[in-house]
Image (cartoon, helix red, strand yellow):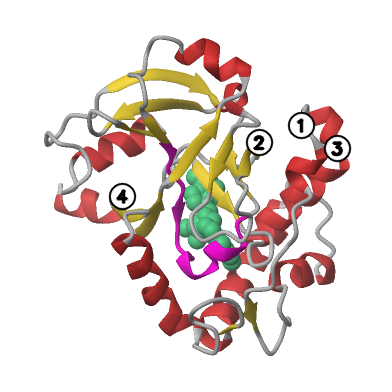
Amino acid sequence: QEYTALKLKVKEWPESAKKILDGKLPEGANVYFIPATLRPETMYGQTCCFVGPNIEYGVFKVSETEFFVCSQRAARNMSYQPGIFPIWGEWPRVASFKGKDVIGTLIDAPLSIHKDGVRILPMETVKDTKGTAVVTCVPSDSPDDYATVMDLSKKAEYYGIKKEWVDLEILPIIDTPTYGNLTAKRLVEEMKIQSPKDTKKLEEAKEKAYKEGFYKGTIIYGEFKGKSVEQAKNLVRKKLMDSGDAFNYAEPDGKVMSRSG
Ligand code: ZZB
C-alpha cells in the first residue's frame, strides 16, 4: 500500500504533553504529526487529526531540528525507506506518549482551509497495525471521519474536549453524481450509521465513497477545480511533496513478505 505521509506541524502542545516532553527536545525543534492518507486530493477539507487515545506513539528524530510523531511500527518501516531517516535501519526515539496525552494539540494542516490550525482529537477505531496510527480527518469524504466528528461533537464533555475543536466547517471538495458534494455525510445518513462503532456499515460506506469519488468525482475546490479526482490525486500529491509538506510512505504488504520469505 502506497500512502502519502503528511507533515502536520505542532503549533502548541497541551500541558499534559509539555510535561512529558520537557527537556527531551532541542530548543526550536519542529515536531510533526504524520498521518498516512490515500486521499491527498481531499486535504483542503481537513478539520482535525486523530490519534488512538490508548495507542502508544513515539517522537522520532529525523534531523537535528525535525521530529516525527507516529507509531513505533511505522517509524521502523520508514527507516527502511529512502529519504526519511538519515541512517538506514535506525529510528531514534526521543520520547513517547499515549494518544490521550496529546489531545488538544494545535497543529498546522497543509492545504486545509482552516488556516488557524486544527486540533488533535481522539478516535477509538484507529488501528495501530495500519499506516502511521495517525489519521487526518476529512469529514466531507471519509464516512469514518464524519461519524467520529458527529460523535465527538455530541459528547464533547465526555471526551474531555472543547466542542469548538470539533465543529469546524465541513468543506465540499468533490462533487459526485450519486452522493452530491458531501459524500461522507450523505452515506452516513442514507445508511443510518449511528456511531463510529458501526464498523461493518462504515466499511461498506468507505468502499462506496472510494469508488464513487475515484471514478466519478470532480474537484470543486482549489487550484485543481474542474479536474477529475483521478487526475487531481497525483497533482495534489506532487504539490505537497514539492513544498516539503509530504513524502511517500509504503506499507510493506504482509502477503508479499510471506510469499518471498
Ligand atoms: C484522509 C482521507 C480522506 C481518507 C478521505 C479516506 C477518505 P484503507 O482504505 O483501509 O487502507 N487511515 C489510515 N491509517 C489508519 C489507521 N491506522 N486506522 C484507521 N484509519 C486509518 O484506509 C486508508 C484510509 O484510512 C486513509 O486515508 C486514512 O483516512 C485512514 F476522504 O486519509 B484517509 C472513503 C475514504 N475517504
Residue lying furthest left in this view? 88
Whichever of callouts 1 and 3 sits on the residue coming sooner in the sequence is 3
Q: Which mark is residue 193?
A: none
Is residue 23 on the magenta stretch?
no
With respect to residue 149, does 201 lie above or below?
A: below
**Residue 203 pos. (x, y %):** 63, 60
Distance in Å between CA atoms under marks 3 and 2: 12 Å
Examine the structure image and report whether residue 36 is included in the region drawn in magenta: yes
Q: Nearer the viewer, residue 38 or 157?
A: 157
Q: In x, y percent, where is residue 29?
A: 36, 27
**Which badge, 4 or 2, comes first in the chain's sequence?**
2
Q: Residues within 10 Å of mark 4 (few under 14, many from 20)?
A: few
Range of residues picked out in magenta:
32-46
Check disc 2 and report the residue beneath it: 122
The percent coordinates of residue 170 (x first, y second) are 73, 62
Q: Residue at x 23, y 28 (%)?
A: 64
Q: Quadrant of residue 220 in the image?
A: bottom right
- Reading the image, the residue beneath label 1 is 161
Q: Amino acid at mark 1?
A: Ile
- Marks 1 and 2 close (CB-CB < 8 Å): yes
